[in-house]
């Protein structure tokens, strides 16, 4: 599949209700499946990545049903999962592979976890190490890459106090998930705060979670109690519209019911300090807070993004880069290491695509520099590199460009935002 996008003369205006949050949808199934009782997940994200989680837990004997836009899960309790009869294929979903490994290892079940080409190239050493320390038999292929093999164990894992060398919610969640099965307290200390959806949903399911600064602990071997979950809109999907409407002159958009968990809203803070006109209307509470976001075009200035801000906006960096290209003055993005091990090497892919459009960004002293300066991008033949967020960010760049852009290999967008093009078309004026 490919997208042909013409640069627009007009503005973006109107409303979009972005798809449900991917991270929350994954966790609602994963932790719902191992809780006791039945839960309804309303506004579940029926996109490729979350369907891999959905199918994987069905393979392990959990009854999970689609009901309209909702999913109903009959939790089987901590000990109720059974080994899958076949390899679990997890597609493009790093979140599924990393968190499910903690659950499967904790449950003592054997499994082989496989993925697509992109997932097969992603580092798993970050979860293999703590899980081995807990006593799991887990190994990768060619070092630490998928497929992952998890061996059956007869006893239980040991609780650990893990200091994570990478700022990653997936690693934190994997260790906490395994800790649910270990006798005693398992804790994870991060260097920077990462998204806390796991902590919130486990608290909602009555787990004993303690948070002290950058350390989160869970008391193991305590059954989780199923409770309904309502999934907010995904701010990472809203990001493309927020970025586009901030820089395309005359634009005004409202993004409805977007998740506003403070560990996910780094992009709003960064763009606001760049001078963007963003306001949150009608913020509502819940396990995950949500609200409507209004964005009006403004004149942006460059900024410095600190390494500790990165986990709070990790998936939004490609969209931020596109907005920053239009700012007065340079934007310097520190702490970009993790961006290189996402669905693609996002630093490389953004650099190459923007270069094809006549715009240069570059690395300097470990930071990614976007020189700003406006200028006009020119339409070009681009590649998504099989990465949904690269495809959508380049679609925003294409709107800002002169002439026509062709983006190849865009089926990957189905992993998080199947209706993206339709929504984008609906707000072009
Ligand atoms: C996710 C965490 C982030 C993010 C990913 C989803 C999650 O990864 O990039 O898209 O749901 O926990 P890391 O925590 O590994 O940075």
Image (cartoon, grey):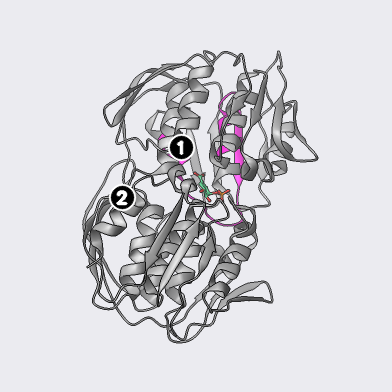
* In the rendered image, the vertical position of residue 362 relative to residue 78, given as above or below: below
- Mark 1 lies on a secondary structure that is helix
Q: Position of residue 214 (x, y in %)?
A: 55, 51
Question: Residue 265: x percent and y percent?
Answer: 39, 59
Local crowd at mark 2 within 10 Å, few (<14), some, or many (≥20)?
many
> Looking at the image, can residue 45 be seen?
yes
- Circles 2 and 1: CB distance less than 8 Å? no
User: Which residue is labeled 2 in the image?
Assistant: 18
- Please tell me in which quadrant of the rendered image residue 65 appears: top left
What is the spatial separation of the Cα atoms under label 2 and label 1, in whole angstroms? 16 Å
Residue sitting at x 63%, y 22%: 87
Residue 189 magenta-drawn?
Answer: yes
The residue labelled by disc 1 is 48
Please report the residue visible at 24 percent of the width from the left and 57 percent of the height from the top.
426
Quarter residue 106 falls in = top right
Q: Nearer the viewer, residue 288 or 51?
A: 51
Quadrant in the rendering for residue 128: top right
User: What is the magenta range?
Assistant: 173-201
| Residue 182 shows in this picture | no
Marks 2, 1: nearer the viewer = 1
Q: Is residue 361 above or below residue 102?
A: below
Q: Counting other residues with Cα less than 10 Å from the Cα at mark 1, is it few (<14), some (14-19), or many (20 or more)?
A: many
Please name the residue shown 58% across and 66% down the image. 307
């Amino acid at each position: 599949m490919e997208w042909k996008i013409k640069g627009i003369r007009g503005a973006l205006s109107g409303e979009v209700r972005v798809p449900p949050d991917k991270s929350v949808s994954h966790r609602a199934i994963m932790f719902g499946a191992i809780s006791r009782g039945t839960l309804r997940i309303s506004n579940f994200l029926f996109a490729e990545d979350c369907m891999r989680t959905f199918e994987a837990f069905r393979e392990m004997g959990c009854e999970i049903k689609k009901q309209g836009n909702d999913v109903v899960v009959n939790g089987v309790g901590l000990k109720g999962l059974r080994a899958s009869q076949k390899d679990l294929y997890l597609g493009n979903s790093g979140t599924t592979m990393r968190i499910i490994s903690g659950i499967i290892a904790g449950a003592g079940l054997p499994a082989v976890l496989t993925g697509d080409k992109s997932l097969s190239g992603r580092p798993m050493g970050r979860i293999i190490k703590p899980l081995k320390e807990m006593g799991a038999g887990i190994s990768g292929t060619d070092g630490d890459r998928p497929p992952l093999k998890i061996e059956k164990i007869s006893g239980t894992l040991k609780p650990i106090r893990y200091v994570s060398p990478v700022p990653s919610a997936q690693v934190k969640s994997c260790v906490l998930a395994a800790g649910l099965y270990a006798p005693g307290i398992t804790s994870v200390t991060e260097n920077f705060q990462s998204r806390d959806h796991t902590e919130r949903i486990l608290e909602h399911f009555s787990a004993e979670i303690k948070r002290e600064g950058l350390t989160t602990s869970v008391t193991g071997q305590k059954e989780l109690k199923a409770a309904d979950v309502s999934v907010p809109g995904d701010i990472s999907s809203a990001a493309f519209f927020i970025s586009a409407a901030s820089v395309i002159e005359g634009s005004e958009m409202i993004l409805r019911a977007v998740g506003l968990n403070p560990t996910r809203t780094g992009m709003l803070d960064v763009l606001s300090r760049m001078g963007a006109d963003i306001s949150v209307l009608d913020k509502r509470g819940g396990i995950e807070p949500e609200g409507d976001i209004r964005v009006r075009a403004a004149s942006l200035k460059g900024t410095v993004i600190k390494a500790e801000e990165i986990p709070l906006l990790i998936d939004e960096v490609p969209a931020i880069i596109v907005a920053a290209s239009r700012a007065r003055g340079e934007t310097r993005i520190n702490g970009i290491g993790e961006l290189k091990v996402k669905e693609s090497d996002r630093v490389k892919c953004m650099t190459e695509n923007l270069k094809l459009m006549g715009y240069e960004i570059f690395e300097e002293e470990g930071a990614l520099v976007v020189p700003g300066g406006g200028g006009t991008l020119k339409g070009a033949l681009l590649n998504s590199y099989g990465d949904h967020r690269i495809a959508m960010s380049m679609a925003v760049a294409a709107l800002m460009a002169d002439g026509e852009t062709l983006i190849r290999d865009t089926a990957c967008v189905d992993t998080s935002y199947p209706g993206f093009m339709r929504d984008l078309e609906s707000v072009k004026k």
